[in-house]
Image (cartoon, helix red, strand yellow):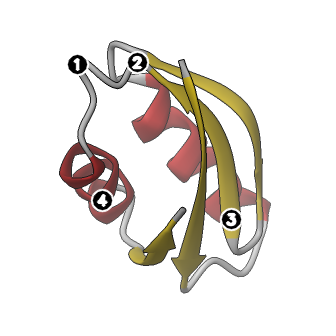
Amino acid sequence: MKHVTIDIEGMTCGHCVMSVRNELGRLEGVTIRSVKIGSAEVEVNETTVQDQMLQNAVAEAGYAVKAIH
Protein backbone atom coordinates (compact mmCIF):
# COMPACT_ATOMS: atom_id res chain seq x y z
CA MET A 1 0.00 0.00 0.00
CA LYS A 2 1.17 3.48 -0.88
CA HIS A 3 0.20 6.67 0.97
CA VAL A 4 -1.26 9.29 -1.40
CA THR A 5 -2.39 12.88 -0.82
CA ILE A 6 -4.94 14.29 -3.26
CA ASP A 7 -5.26 18.08 -3.46
CA ILE A 8 -8.83 18.90 -4.48
CA GLU A 9 -10.28 22.11 -5.90
CA GLY A 10 -13.82 23.34 -5.31
CA MET A 11 -14.67 21.75 -1.95
CA THR A 12 -16.35 24.20 0.44
CA CYS A 13 -18.41 22.30 3.02
CA GLY A 14 -19.16 19.07 4.82
CA HIS A 15 -21.37 17.87 1.98
CA CYS A 16 -18.36 18.18 -0.35
CA VAL A 17 -16.28 16.09 2.04
CA MET A 18 -18.98 13.41 2.21
CA SER A 19 -19.32 13.29 -1.60
CA VAL A 20 -15.58 12.84 -2.15
CA ARG A 21 -15.35 10.25 0.65
CA ASN A 22 -18.20 8.25 -0.88
CA GLU A 23 -16.72 8.22 -4.38
CA LEU A 24 -13.20 7.32 -3.24
CA GLY A 25 -14.66 4.65 -0.98
CA ARG A 26 -16.17 2.89 -3.99
CA LEU A 27 -12.75 2.17 -5.45
CA GLU A 28 -11.44 -1.29 -4.72
CA GLY A 29 -7.88 -1.07 -3.43
CA VAL A 30 -8.35 2.34 -1.76
CA THR A 31 -8.41 2.83 2.01
CA ILE A 32 -9.45 6.31 3.11
CA ARG A 33 -7.40 7.83 5.93
CA SER A 34 -9.05 11.27 5.93
CA VAL A 35 -11.00 13.65 3.75
CA LYS A 36 -11.22 17.34 4.56
CA ILE A 37 -12.01 20.47 2.60
CA GLY A 38 -9.35 20.69 -0.09
CA SER A 39 -7.67 17.31 0.28
CA ALA A 40 -7.90 13.59 0.85
CA GLU A 41 -5.37 11.18 2.36
CA VAL A 42 -5.65 7.60 1.14
CA GLU A 43 -3.71 4.36 1.01
CA VAL A 44 -3.78 2.71 -2.41
CA ASN A 45 -2.88 -0.71 -3.75
CA GLU A 46 -0.35 0.33 -6.41
CA THR A 47 -0.98 -2.74 -8.56
CA THR A 48 -4.71 -2.07 -9.01
CA VAL A 49 -5.21 1.69 -8.50
CA GLN A 50 -3.85 4.33 -10.88
CA ASP A 51 -3.91 8.11 -10.38
CA GLN A 52 -6.49 8.44 -13.17
CA MET A 53 -8.91 6.30 -11.17
CA LEU A 54 -8.56 8.67 -8.21
CA GLN A 55 -9.07 11.68 -10.49
CA ASN A 56 -12.17 10.10 -12.00
CA ALA A 57 -13.66 9.40 -8.56
CA VAL A 58 -13.11 13.00 -7.45
CA ALA A 59 -14.61 14.24 -10.74
CA GLU A 60 -17.64 11.98 -10.19
CA ALA A 61 -18.16 13.78 -6.89
CA GLY A 62 -18.11 17.09 -8.79
CA TYR A 63 -14.63 18.40 -7.99
CA ALA A 64 -11.23 18.73 -9.68
CA VAL A 65 -7.89 17.27 -8.65
CA LYS A 66 -5.12 19.88 -8.45
CA ALA A 67 -2.35 17.39 -7.61
CA ILE A 68 -1.72 13.84 -6.48
CA HIS A 69 1.41 13.22 -4.45
State the mark number for residue 48: 1
Label 3, secondary structure: give it: strand
Residues at discs 2 and 1 in contact (Cβ within 8 Å): yes
The quarter of the image holding the C terminus is bottom right
Q: Point out the tag, 1 or 3, that comes first from the N-terminus.
A: 3
Image coordinates for residue 59, horizontal then vertical, percent = 29, 64
Instruction: Judge the density around disc 1: few (<14), some (14-19), many (≥20) Cα neighbours within 10 Å.
Output: few
Q: CA distance from mark 4 to mark 1?
A: 15 Å
Which residue: 41% across, 39% down? 23
Q: CA distance from mark 4 to mark 3?
A: 12 Å
Position of residue 14 in the picture relative to residue 44 (left or right): right
Label 2, secondary structure: give it: loop
Image coordinates for residue 13, horizontal then vertical, percent = 76, 72
Residues at discs 4 and 3 in contact (Cβ within 8 Å): no
Q: Image height check: is 42 above or below 38?
A: above
Q: CA distance from mark 2 to mark 4?
A: 15 Å
State the mark number for residue 45: 2
Q: Point out the tag, 2 or 4, that comes first from the N-terminus.
A: 2
Q: Image height check: is 1 above or below 52?
A: above
State the mark number for residue 39: 3
Q: Amino acid at mark 1?
A: Thr
Label 4, secondary structure: give it: helix
Q: Which residue is mark 4?
A: 55
Nearest to the observer: residue 6 or residue 22: 6
Nearest to the observer: residue 51 or residue 34: 51
Q: Image height check: is 27 above or below 42?
A: above
Image coordinates for residue 1, horizontal then vertical, percent = 53, 17
Q: Amino acid at mark 3?
A: Ser
Q: CA distance from mark 2 to mark 1?
A: 6 Å
Residues at discs 4 and 1 in contact (Cβ within 8 Å): no
Q: CA distance from mark 1 to mark 3?
A: 22 Å
Image coordinates for residue 61, horizontal then vertical, percent = 38, 57
